Amino acid sequence: MADVRAFGARGDGRADDTQAIQRAVKEGDGLLIFPRGVYRVTRPIEVALADCGPASISGSDGVARVVMEGAGPAFHLLGTHEG
């Protein structure tokens, strides 16, 4: 389980949380937790399913929202669970 705030995401709606969330994806176990807040991203967060296996994105402690302020989707899932 990877709480995105433990990787530096602020969730204040102003800071660019892209790098922190991407770090949580790469270093976590496939389960992303977003505590209450507004998470601003400026490029797609890449989730390589071959690397992390089954993936889950979940909120905790109220409403969590990811706001994409760049081109493309907020999350880009790559590959399959089989590799």
Image: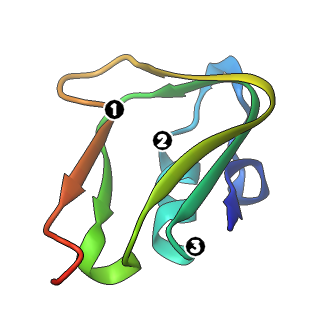
- Hey, what amino acid is under mark 2? Thr
Distance from disc 3 to disc 1, alpha carbons, whole Å, reads: 18 Å
Estimate the x, y position of residue 59 in percent, counting from the top left. Answer: 68, 37
Q: Which residue is mark 2?
A: 18
The numbered mark at residue 44 is none
Residue extending farthest right? 61
Please tell me which residue lies in front, 22 or 31.
31
In this image, 2 relative to 62: left or right?
A: left
Estimate the x, y position of residue 3 in percent, counting from the top left. Answer: 73, 55
Label 2–label 3 contact, CB within 8 A: no
- Hey, what amino acid is under mark 1? Ala
- Using the rendered view, name the quadrant where residue 43 is placed: top left
Distance from disc 2 to disc 3, alpha carbons, whole Å, reads: 15 Å
Front: mark 2 or 1: 1
Say few, some or many: other residues with alpha carbon within 10 Å of mark 1 (under 14 / 14 to 19 / 20 or more): some
- Using the rendered view, name the quadrant where residue 62 is placed: top right
Compared to 68, does 52 lie above or below?
A: below
The numbered mark at residue 74 is 1
Q: Who's the residue at 55% across and 76% down the image?
A: 29
Please tell me which residue lies in front, 46 or 1.
1
Q: Which residue is mark 3?
A: 28
Estimate the x, y position of residue 11 in percent, counting from the top left. Answer: 71, 28
